[in-house]
Amino acid sequence: MGNTLKQQLADNVKTAMRAKDSARLGTLRFLQAAIKQKEVDDRRDLADADITAIIEKQVKQRRESIAAFEQAGRLETAEQEKAELAVLQEFLPKQAEPAEIDAAIDAAIAEVNGQGVTGAPAMGKVMAMLKTALAGRADMSAVSAQVKTRLM
C-alpha cells in the first residue's frame, strides 16, 4: 500500500524536529493531534481519505483566519497562518488545474440537469458530486461560488 498519510506525517515530524523547525513542527503536531482525536472519537484507525478530510477542514479554517487577520490589519498573524496553510497543503493531493475544475463543474451540472433538477435544488446535488470528484484538490468554497453563478 506504500506510505500512508499518517506515516508521511510522522516522518515529517521527525525531520522538522531534527531541523529544529519549530513553526513547521507545531503545525504538524497540531494536525497529528486532530487525527488522533478523531481516531479516539470514532474508535478506529483513519484511512487516508479521512485524514485528507481533516486536513481540508484545517486548510479551510486557515483560509478564513487569514482573511480575518488581514481585515483586522494583523498581518504578522496572517503570515503565520499562511505558513501553516502551506505546510498543511503539502499533505493534500496535487491541486486541480482551473480547466479541470471547470470541466468537472460542467459535467456535474449537465448530469444533474439531465435528471431534470435545475436551479437551487441542483446546487446541493452538483456540490455533492464535485466534493467527491475534487476531494482535497480544490478550494470548495471557490468551487461553490462558481457553481452558484452558473446555476442561478
Image: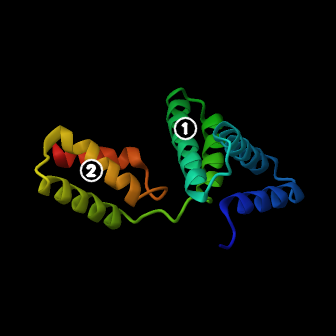
In the displayed structure, would residue 132 be above or below residue 23? below
Task: State left or right for residue 11 relative to residue 20.
Answer: left
Where is residue 106, by image quadrant?
bottom left
1 or 2: tag closer to the N-terminus = 1
Q: Secondary structure at mark 1?
A: helix
Q: Of 147 and 132, which appears nearest the observer?
A: 132
The residue under label 2 is 126
CA distance for labels 1 and 2:
23 Å
Q: Of 61 and 33, which appears nearest the observer?
A: 33
Picture coordinates of residue 70, whole percent (x, y) = 53, 34
At label 1, the amino acid type is Gln
Task: State left or right for residue 89 relative to residue 64.
Answer: right
Residue 90 visible, this angle: yes
Between circles 1 and 2, the one closer to the viewer is 2
Pointer 1: residues within 10 angstroms few (<14), some, or many (20+)? few
Residue 148 visible, this angle: no
Picture coordinates of residue 26, whole percent (x, y) = 77, 44
In the displayed structure, would residue 152 be above or below residue 114? above
At label 2, the amino acid type is Val
Residue placed furthest toward the left: 116
In the displayed structure, would residue 9 be above or below residue 118? below
Picture coordinates of residue 68, whole percent (x, y) = 51, 30
Task: State left or right for residue 118 relative to residue 81.
Answer: left
The residue positioned 34% from the left and 54% from the top of the image is 130
The residue positioned 19% from the left and 59% from the top of the image is 111
Where is residue 19, by image quadrant?
bottom right
The residue positioned 32% from the left and 45% from the top of the image is 144
Q: Of 39 and 122, which appears nearest the observer?
A: 39
Instruction: Check if mark 1's residue and mark 2's residue have beta carbons within 8 Å.
Output: no
Q: Of 132 and 148, which appears nearest the observer?
A: 132
Residue 61, disc: 1
